[in-house]
Amino acid sequence: MDAFVKEFIEVRVRCLKIQCKTTWHPYVDYEIFVHTNSISFSLKSSCVQRRFREFVWLRRWLEKSAAEMEVPDLPARNPFFSCFNPEDVEQRRRGLQEFLDRIVKTAFFLSDSRLHLFLQSRLSTDEIEACVQGRTSFSVRDAILKGPQTDGRFSLKDTMKQLPPHGELMGKQVDEEHADVLNITPDAEGFCSWVQKEEDRESK
């Protein structure tokens, strides 16, 4: 391993799926991938799902704790937004990506437990608040380390074990079987490859 490894925090947001089976109001689940070597994070790699209103909740709390510090904006609410319009969904995804990119580059925000629970746990916003206030039987760290990391799907580590070796994956299209396991998109494919490369490099 290099004598000095530069700290990095990589966050990727992708549109996962539309949820409309159990609600009159369909919404989009956004999948958040995190890969980092920062000591600020409990996990080096994680993957969770969040919806837009949870991002709104997060920004509201960061704004309250930031006092006079400027908090990055979320994509503006569009009264005509449609979950079934690919352009609307992609525009919002890009806005959420930019929001998180700016948040994780600010040391002050990285000290907020709510942000870490939002990015690396499956807790709901109410559960996050209860945990931060000490009203749960588990700590913030326990919620991240001991809780499921993939919303009932696969962890990044387990998922990558089912893929071809990193050298075979790079530059090739994922076959249908592996794509189905991952529910993969080109961005997610590249991210998983990049994660594997980083973990291989760090283990040397």
Image (cartoon, grey):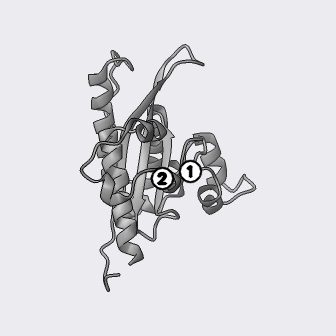
- Relative to 197, say whether 1 is above or below: below
Q: Residues within 10 Å of mark 2 (few under 14, many from 20)?
A: many
Q: Position of residue 174 (x, y in %)?
A: 34, 42
In this orientation, does residue 63 appear?
A: yes
Q: Residue at x 32, y 86 (%)?
A: 3
Q: Disc 2 designates what residue?
A: 156
Q: CA separation, marks 2 and 1? A: 9 Å
Disc 2 versus disc 1: nearer the observer: 2
Q: Residue at x 46, y 58 (%)?
A: 45
Q: Earlier in the sequence, mark 2 or mark 1?
A: 1
Rendering quarter of residue 186: top left
Q: Would you say 33 lies left or right of 19 here?
A: left
- Relative to 93, say whether 25 is above or below: above
| Secondary element type, mark 1 | loop
Q: Disc 1 designates what residue?
A: 149
> Are dots 2 and 1 in contact, CB under 8 Å?
yes
Residue type, label 2? Leu
Image quarter of the C terminus: bottom left
Q: Residue at x 44, y 38 (%)?
A: 177
Q: Would you say 88 lies left or right of 143 here?
A: left
Q: Which mark is residue 101?
A: none
Q: Residue at x 51, y 16 (%)?
A: 25
